[in-house]
Amino acid sequence: MKPDKIDFKIIETLQRHGRMTNKELAEHVSLSPSACLERHKRLEQEGILHSYGAQVALEKITPYSAVLVEVTLKNHLSADFQRFENAIIKIPEIVECYAVGGGIDYVLKFVARSIEHYQQMMEQLLNDDIGIDRYFSYFITQQVKKTPYPVSRFVQDTKATDSE
């Protein structure tokens, strides 16, 4: 079943306020609690809503360095990509990894205790010979924006598609 405007309102609300009760969610999206719960469960069953979690303010716990890293591999066979990805998946400090096109192969996001800690991890990756040809590091100095996905901005008006 294709999500409608109410489903998108539920999704966007839960992205911003994941701990709200079903009653609060129902009020926010102007549904009865039972109808809201039914839609919420359907969105989970269809895999549209696939997890819930807390966003941690790591800076309130400990100092850290966040680093974005562009990686280009030496070779581009399927086995080369798989070897690199298998190694990256095992490193907890790499919190995001994206395969990309356009001149580089991957963009990684590291969180490290310090710049020295990050450099030790990169040296270990190079020593592990997982196929890295080049890498460029960008130290994050300030997060300017981080928002939930604007899901309702990616769909056409459901009234136009419902009448067809």
Image (cartoon, grey):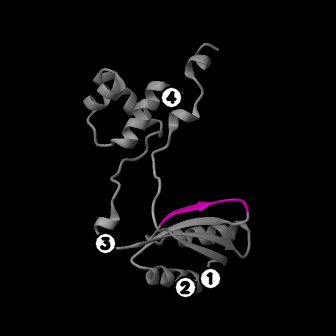
* Quadrant hosting residue 161: top right
Residue at x 28% of width, y 68% of height: 61
Q: Position of residue 71 (x, y in %)?
A: 63, 71
Identify which residue, 102 or 90, lies in the foreground.
102
- Using the numbered discs, state the Cα–Cα distance from disc 2 to disc 1 in whole angstroms: 10 Å
The mark nearer the N terminus, 3 or 1, is: 3
Indicate which label's residue lies in the foreground, 3 or 4.
3
Indicate which label's residue lies in the foreground, 3 or 2.
3
Residue at numbered disc 2: 123
The dot on residue 62 is: 3
The answer to the question of whether label 4 and label 2 lie on touching residues, with beta carbons closer than 8 A, is: no
Q: Amino acid at mark 1?
A: Asp
Q: Amino acid at mark 2?
A: Glu
The mark nearer the N terminus, 3 or 4, is: 4
The residue positioned farthest toward the top in the image shown: 163
- Using the numbered discs, state the Cα–Cα distance from disc 3 to disc 1 in whole angstroms: 31 Å
The dot on residue 129 is: 1
Residue at x 55% of width, y 63% of height: 97
- Using the numbered discs, state the Cα–Cα distance from disc 4 to disc 2 in whole angstroms: 46 Å
Q: Amino acid at mark 3?
A: Thr
